[in-house]
Amino acid sequence: MTAVHLQGEVWMGSAPLIRNLSLHFPAGRWSCLLGPSGVGKSTVARLIAGLPGPYRMNGVVAAEDSLPLHGRVAMLAQLAQLLPWADLVQNVTIGARLRGARPDVARALALLENVGLAGVERRRPDALSGGQRQRVALARVLIEDCPVVVLDEPFSALDTVTRLAMQDLAARLLRGRTVILITHDPLEAIRLSDVAWLLDPDGTEALTLPAAPTPRDFSAPETLAAQARLLALLHARTLSPDPKDLCDAPH
Ligand SMILES: Nc1ncnc2c1ncn2[C@@H]1O[C@H](COP(=O)(O)OP(=O)(O)OP(=O)(O)O)[C@@H](O)[C@H]1O
Ligand SMILES: [Mg+2]
């Protein structure tokens, strides 16, 4: 299992994006990253996945076992696209095919079955619902079998009920991995996270979560109360980005 930590400051081109970044994602647990649009969440995701971009980290992005992160991170990108001309098996095995490796079709079929898509493996994405497409994207992450998984707003396009089902599915299939979930949805964060971080341009803040094990019951009073508290905090931050102004925010 692999814990991940980031420490330092992130620059976007010649401008600072996040100062005093200090994030710890514990091994084998789900961590959630929240924050206003444009604050840099996807940039943090790309830094962890080692993807290139116009940003620069002045500091550390590392696994705590001191082994390189490279090759150990699978990412479900924000607005993950499936290849429209390829069937589901070809979509799930795209990573191997891009690397010039032999696609493991048997494993792709097993994973598609795991995500509830047995029987439609040879369809193309345009013959699927939005929720089914997200399940294909999840299978594409799972086939990489990486200890660290970054999910950047994986279920944001789905209706509330489908989203709850996808949260349960992802929690089951990714159990034991170090998962970093980026979301704007307070209920999703509260249901799935062992650890939650709020990102703002001046740094990071750890949030308090209910004690119940994940995935938390969406109708439990503790879940709903935590959701309301988090929503109030996000609302206050959006209206008033200066943390000093938060003293009177509802708790
Ligand atoms: N390729 C790019 N070139 C220049 N600026 C960029 C680029 N990608 C992102 N940015 C800027 O960097 C900042 C952080 O972007 P990022 O995508 O990380 O935000 P985010 O927190 O994921 O937002 P959202 O919640 O809307 O997805 C934004 O101000 C964005 O405009
Ligand atoms: Mg983003």
Image: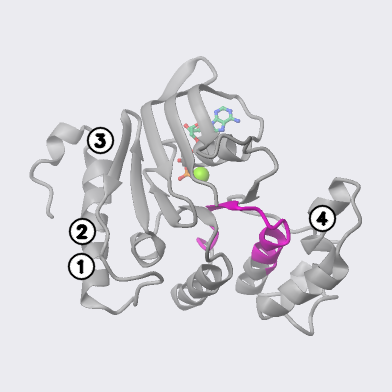
Residue picked out by circle 4: 94
Q: Looking at the rendering, which quadrant does residue 127 occupy? A: bottom right
Q: Alpha carbon of mark 4 to alpha carbon of mark 1: how far?
A: 42 Å
Mark on residue 213?
A: none
Question: Does 105 appear above or below 154?
Answer: below
Residue picked out by circle 1: 225
Q: Alpha carbon of mark 1 to alpha carbon of mark 3: how far?
A: 23 Å
Q: Position of residue 82 (x, y in %)?
A: 74, 59
- The mark that comes first in sequence, 3 or 4, is 4
Q: Alpha carbon of mark 4 to alpha carbon of mark 2: how far?
A: 41 Å
Residue picked out by circle 2: 229
Residue picked out by circle 3: 241
Q: Position of residue 131 (x, y in %)?
A: 60, 72
The kind of residue tagged 3 is Pro
- Residue sitting farthest toward the top: 14
| 123 or 7, nearer to the observer | 7
For the question of whether residue 67 can be seen, the reply is yes
Q: Which residues are magenta?
A: 136-156
Q: Is residue 210 left or right of residue 132?
A: left
Q: Secondary structure at mark 4?
A: helix
The kind of residue tagged 4 is Ile
Disc 3 residue lies near ligand 1 with CB under 8 A: no
The kind of residue tagged 1 is Ala
Q: Nearer the viewer, mark 3 or mark 4?
A: 4
At x 24% / y 54%, what residue is drawn?
208
